[in-house]
Amino acid sequence: MNTEIKIAIDLWEEDEEGVITTWFVSNGGEIEKGEVVAEVMVQKIQYEIFSPSAGQVKIIKKPDETVNKGDIIGLVSGD
């Protein structure tokens, strides 16, 4: 079963776009639940994105891609 890695709708206050700056795991890499998997920059502030479950990561949105609240940026299979 796949679990979505999403940009939380309450992550930042304004309805602005963000940009994925860093993935801390490679595509196909293993991650534990609660680990930081990525960072998103919004108005010069870095927000950490945490893994909702343990397993293997499939990256959907690449670094430098624009994202909005609610966007799915990756999937975790396993757990």
Image: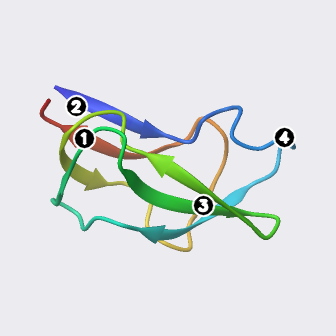
Q: Earlier in the sequence, mark 2 or mark 1?
A: 2
For disc 1, the marked residue is 76
Answer whether labels 3 and 1 touch (C-beta < 8 Å): no
For disc 3, the marked residue is 40
Q: For mark 2, give the secondary structure.
A: strand
Q: Looking at the image, how many numbered discs can be counted on the residues?
A: 4
Q: CA distance from mark 2 to mark 4?
A: 28 Å
- Relative placement, left or right, of 73 versus 15 is left
Name the quarter where the C terminus is drawn. top left
Q: Position of residue 55 (x, y in %)?
A: 16, 42
Q: What's the residue type where badge 4 is placed?
A: Glu
Q: Earlier in the sequence, mark 4 or mark 3?
A: 4
- Residue 32: which quarter of the image? top left
Q: What's the residue type where badge 3 is placed?
A: Val
Q: For mark 1, give the secondary structure.
A: strand
- Relative placement, left or right, of 31 versus 78 is right
- Residue 2: which quarter of the image? top left
For disc 2, the marked residue is 2
Q: What's the residue type where badge 1 is placed?
A: Val
Residue 13 is labelled as: 4
Q: Position of residue 43 (x, y in %)?
A: 82, 65
Q: Earlier in the sequence, mark 2 or mark 4?
A: 2
Which residue is at 47% across, 71% downward?
22
